[in-house]
């Protein structure tokens, strides 16, 4: 697919989109879920293609919502819950909007667009947003810290994993290796390790935009819920769950639900796996999500068979900064996933 992706993005998908053929493709599984990670605030300068690639621009987000409202039936999280728990019928071509991580810009920049377009979103936040001083996502801060100064041998004394990453493999490979290894630590130990790195470096440069980097705090999370949005859980600290011990994985999932319910005073019924692919979670995590009392759990990939998805491995269309409207339409329609399956044979 990588070899043909430029052709798909710039020729095939636009041809299908502008000819109206995508609208004739029936949805698989009854409902398509579309996933965001927030929007880029206007005061966020010099967007980093790597770190910011999972976010979208405000007008890009608005155009995508308007497209969905025109071509699909955008449902509320409550409608989705009734479908998944009780088998209530959904309208044809149903689409659900979700958003992971709980960055501050979801309240300051994303919510106004949702309200203008009269769309309800299912937000997934970590337990950090249930406190007063949530800070940044630890793995994003780690990227800033490693870019400011590479890890020393003393600083990189993390649990080991299969394979080694060398300096010649590049910054992003070394960072992801550190993320995986740090995910083997308990959350408190990982936070202490990040604090140690922070103390030996300058404060990461966030281009002056707190809205880009900071997570929602408890007051802001309450405001988001009061605006009619639904809040789901995204673990306590956003580790690679598959690398956590059994006890830590269970705590990450169960405690995130408990903390959100404590702050909001309402049931948190949906869960989203951090990083959300089959390299970062598996059967154990699905079982733990079900055991913890969630009604369903979401991946961050649109993958799997074309029949009704399983409740604890629900696929989603992962929206990125470089995704133009024809490509977005191809993903939502299921064309992209069909082509992936055809290539795999």
Image (spheres, grey):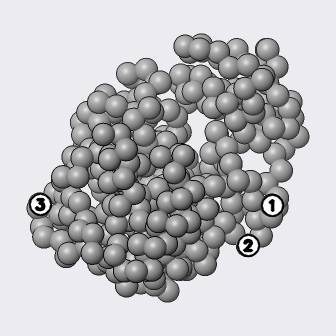
Q: Which residue is mark 1?
A: 46
Q: How many marks?
A: 3
| Residue 128 versus residue 325 in the image, above or below | above
**Alpha carbons under labels 3 and 2: distance apart:** 42 Å
Measuring 59% from the left and 14% from the top, which residue is drawn there? 163
Q: Secondary structure at mark 1?
A: loop
- Residue 239 is situated, as x and y percent measured from the top left of the image, at 52, 34
Nearest the camera: 164 or 204? Answer: 164
Q: Is residue 86 above or below residue 281?
A: below
- In three-dimensional space, the C-alpha distance between marks 1 and 2, rounded to whole angstroms, equals 11 Å
Q: Which residue is mark 2?
A: 42
Task: Please tell me the numbered disc located at residue 86.
Answer: 3
As drawn, 242 above or below 99: above
For the C terminus, the quadrant is top left
- Of tags 1 and 2, which is closer to the observer? 1
Q: Is residue 193 left or right of residue 148?
A: left
- Left or right of 130 on screen, residue 213: right
**Closer to us: 133 or 174:** 174
Give neighbour class at mark 3: few <14, some 14-19, many 20+ (Cα, 10 Å): few
């Amino acid at each position: 697919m990588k070899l043909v992706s430029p052709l798909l993005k710039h020729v095939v998908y636009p041809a299908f989109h502008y000819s109206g053929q995508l609208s004739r493709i029936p949805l698989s599984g009854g409902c398509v879920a579309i996933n965001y990670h927030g929007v880029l605030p206007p005061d966020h300068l010099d967007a980093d293609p790597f770190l910011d690639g999972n976010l979208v621009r405000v007008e890009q987000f608005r155009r995508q919502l308007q497209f969905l409202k025109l071509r699909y039936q955008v449902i509320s999280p409550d409608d989705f819950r009734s479908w998944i728990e009780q088998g209530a019928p959904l309208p044809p071509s149903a689409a659900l909007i979700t958003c992971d991580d709980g960055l501050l810009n979801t309240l300051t920049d994303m919510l106004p667009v949702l309200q203008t377009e009269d769309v309800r979103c299912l937000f997934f936040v970590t337990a950090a947003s249930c406190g007063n001083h949530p800070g940044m996502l630890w793995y994003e801060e780690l990227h800033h810290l490693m870019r400011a100064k590479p890890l020393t041998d003393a600083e990189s004394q993390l649990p080991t994993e299969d394979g080694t990453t060398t300096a010649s493999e590049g910054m992003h490979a070394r960072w992801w290796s550190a993320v995986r290894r740090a995910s083997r630590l308990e959350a408190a130990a990982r936070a202490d390790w990040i604090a140690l790195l922070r103390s030996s470096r300058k404060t990461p440069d966030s281009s002056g935009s707190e809205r880009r980097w900071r997570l929602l705090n408890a007051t802001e999370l309450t405001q988001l819920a009061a605006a009619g949005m639904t809040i789901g859980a995204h673990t306590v600290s956003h580790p690679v769950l598959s690398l956590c011990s059994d006890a830590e994985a269970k705590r990450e999932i169960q405690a995130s639900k408990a903390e959100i319910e404590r702050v909001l005073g309402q049931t948190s019924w949906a869960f989203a796996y951090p990083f959300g692919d089959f390299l970062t979670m598996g059967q154990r995590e699905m079982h733990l999500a079900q055991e913890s009392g969630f009604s369903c759990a979401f991946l961050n990939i649109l993958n799997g068979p074309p029949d009704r998805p399983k409740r604890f491995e629900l696929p989603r269309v992962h929206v990125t900064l470089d995704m133009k409207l024809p490509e977005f339409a191809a993903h939502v329609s299921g064309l992209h996933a069909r082509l992936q399956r055809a290539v795999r044979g």
